[in-house]
Image: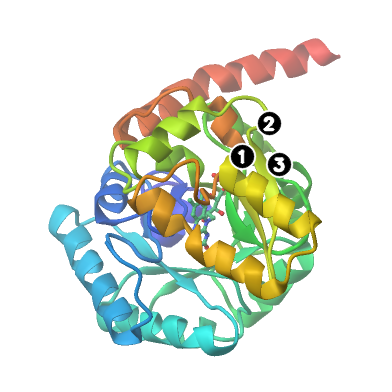
């Protein structure tokens, strides 16, 4: 068994975790990552084909995905619990019930306080990984009893708080602040990023965008092509009511910015967001008109490959990259 703290904790071969992605990380992606020795994570709306506000249906759709993963692999996997705020907590409450009933081994908890579900999940024998974006939040999660924290740097695709700590700065700060294992993500897409994360003090790697651009992800092909087509500074930080999102620059991000600059009424803005949601890009393929959450690492992704290729590429390049690093460090003096 590996001496790596994340591998030991989760019972996996390689400390590479596929981050949860709304509409994108369904059972096929999750099973492929877990089967390759990493940890796959089912995200909100995994495998779903329409939007629903029905809490019961949301739970049953996730249950079906959990069972589908288990049909394909015996390996450990995770389910994302997006805690949420106000009324929306009813969805995460349901999700916790389902994963406890289904005896899912790992929960990745995000967008909310670690005080809400940690104890309940741990009492059910579930390992809890909590997503944070500041050292203060990491310490709070450790105090609440989570098994490991996940750093989400500013480069990361998707929604997070308003803090702008980059992976380069956040990771060592958190590694210094807590004693539990640290997983880090935001901007990692290949062996160079993995090695850098390890050097910064991380025990495990968290990758979303790179896995979105794989054959197994539920992302629409037009979205995958748009990610591969993204060059240089192809993403932008998008301010919303309670959070920031990092999105691929497209007509949606331009129109949204124009509305904000014009000081549009909050109701107009919220309607615009509803009518151009990720469901429309990820499921219907409206890759220019609708929102695509996406990390800065898109600029490093040159092709859509299989999950196995992503894993093999990282694992096979890690040794040579490490040798190169050692040479560079030696040459430094
Ligand atoms: C398309 C997409 C959807 C996402 N949806 C979620 C989500 O539902 N829940 C969550 O906790 N994080 C979500 N995230 C954030 C990821 O879990 C993760 O923090 C991020 O992808 C890591 O950075 P990277 O994209 O640079 O790899 C999403 C990210 C992307 C790209």
Front residue of 192/209: it is 209
- The residue nearer to you, when weighing 164 against 220, is 220
Residue 292 in the image: state x and y as whole percent: 51, 48
Closest to the observer, 180 or 91: 91
Determine whether 290 is above or below 91 in the image. Answer: above
Distance between the alpha carbons at the discs numbered 2 and 3:
24 Å
Q: Which residue is mark 1?
A: 249
Question: Measuring 51% from the left and 66% from the top, which residue is drawn there?
Answer: 274
Residue 137 position (above or below residue 60): above
Q: Nearer the viewer, residue 295 or 231?
A: 231
Q: Are marks 1 and 2 in contact (CB under 8 Å)?
A: yes
Disc assigned to residue 174: none
For residue 233, which numbered disc appears in the image?
2
**Mark 2 Cα within 10 Å, few/some/many (few <14, many 20+)?**
few
Quarter residue 137 falls in: bottom right
On the question of residue 20 being in view, the answer is: no
Dividing the picture into quadrants, the one containing residue 152 is bottom right
N-terminal of the pair, mark 2 or mark 3, is 3
To which quarter of the image does residue 327 belong? Answer: top right
Residue 248 image position (x, y, % from top left): 58, 41
Query: Dot 3: few (<14), some (14–19), or many (≥20) neighbours within 10 Å?
Result: some
Q: Can see residue 133?
A: yes
Taking the spot 68% from the left edge, 31% from the top edge, the residue there is 233
Residue 200: assigned label: 3
| Secondary structure category for the residue under label 3 | loop
| Residue pictured at 80% horizontal, 55% vertical | 261
- Work out which residue is located at the far left of the displayed protein and give it: 71
Q: CA distance from mark 3 to mark 1?
A: 29 Å
């Amino acid at each position: 068994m590996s001496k790596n703290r994340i591998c030991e904790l989760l019972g996996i071969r390689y400390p590479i975790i596929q981050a949860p992605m709304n509409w994108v990380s369904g059972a096929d992606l999750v099973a492929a990552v877990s089967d390759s020795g990493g940890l796959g994570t089912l995200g909100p709306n995994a495998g779903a084909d329409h939007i629903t506000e029905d809490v019961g249906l949301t739970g049953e759709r996730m249950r079906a995905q959990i069972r589908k993963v288990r049909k394909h692999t015996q390996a450990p996997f995770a389910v994302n619990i997006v805690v949420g705020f106000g009324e929306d907590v009813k969805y995460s409450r349901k999700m916790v019930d389902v994963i406890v009933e289904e005896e899912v081994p790992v929960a990745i908890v995000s967008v909310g306080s670690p005080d809400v579900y940690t104890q309940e999940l741990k009492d059910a024998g579930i390992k809890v990984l909590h997503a944070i974006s500041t050292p203060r939040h990491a310490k709070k999660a450790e105090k609440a009893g989570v098994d490991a924290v996940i750093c989400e740097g500013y480069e990361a695709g998707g929604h997070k708080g308003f803090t702008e700590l980059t992976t380069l700065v956040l990771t060592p700060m958190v590694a210094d602040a807590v004693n539990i294992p640290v997983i880090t993500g935001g901007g990692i897409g290949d062996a160079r990023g993995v090695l850098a994360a390890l050097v910064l003090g991380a025990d495990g790697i968290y990758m979303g965008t790179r896995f979105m651009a794989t054959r197994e992800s539920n992302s629409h092909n037009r979205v995958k092509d748009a990610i591969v087509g993204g060059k240089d500074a192809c993403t932008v930080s998008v301010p919303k009511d309670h959070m920031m999102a990092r999105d691929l620059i497209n007509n949606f991000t331009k129109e949204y910015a124009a509305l904000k600059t014009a000081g549009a009424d909050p109701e107009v803005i919220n309607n615009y967001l509803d009518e151009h949601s990720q469901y429309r890009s990820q499921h219907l393929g409206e890759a220019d008109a609708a929102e695509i959450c996406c990390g800065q690492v898109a600029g490093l992704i040159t092709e859509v490959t299989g999950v196995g290729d992503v894993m093999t590429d990282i694992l096979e390049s890690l040794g040579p990259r490490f040798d190169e690093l050692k040479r560079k460090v030696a040459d430094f003096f």
